[in-house]
Image (cartoon, helix red, strand yellow):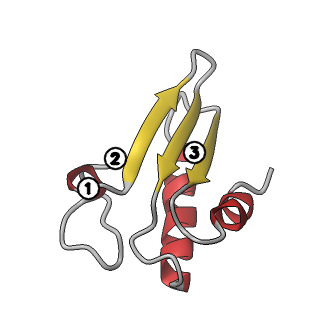
Amino acid sequence: MFRTWRDPHAEHPLSETDQIRGVEVSDEGIVQIVMVPERPHCPCCLYDLKDLREKIQSLRGVAGVQLKITDVPAAERWTRVLNPE
């Protein structure tokens, strides 16, 4: 997934950037991703991460997805908005 997903502001797929800081997949199928948005004040980055979360959620075997945003101003707000559960 990360090899083909492109941030709206990046030339390269997510797998070739430093935006992804960590990925964990539990035995129950819960995917936790720690990320740094390319541009923390850009609304399209927020919508893009929402779309990425939904795409991962749609994969077979995935029971849930949690994005944790880090290293940007108001990271906790980004995290809260991106994880509606």
- Going by the numbered disc 2, the residue's amino acid type is Met
Viewer-side residue, 69 vs 44: 69
Viewer-side residue, 20 vs 26: 20
- Going by the numbered disc 1, the residue's amino acid type is Thr
Dot label at residue 57: 3
Mark 2, Cα crowd under 10 Å, few <14 / some 14-19 / many 20+, is few
**SS for tag 1?**
loop
At x 30%, y 66%, the residue is 6
User: Is disc 2 in contact with disc 1, using a CB cutoff of under 8 Å?
Assistant: yes
User: Is disc 3 in contact with disc 1, using a CB cutoff of under 8 Å?
Assistant: no
Mark 3, Cα crowd under 10 Å, few <14 / some 14-19 / many 20+, is some
Answer above or below: position of 11 versus 33: below
Relative image position of residue 74 (x, y in whole percent): 66, 70
* Distance between mark 3 and mark 1 Cα atoms: 16 Å
Relative image position of residue 76 (x, y in whole percent): 70, 60
Quadrant assignment, res 11: bottom left
**SS for tag 3?**
helix
Residue under circle 2?
A: 1
Q: Is residue 1 left or right of residue 25?
A: left
Residue under circle 1?
A: 4
**SS for tag 2?**
loop
Q: Is residue 58 visible?
A: no
* Distance between mark 3 and mark 2 Cα atoms: 11 Å
At x 45%, y 36%, the residue is 23
Answer above or below: position of 1 versus 14: above
Relative image position of residue 64 (x, y in whole percent): 65, 37
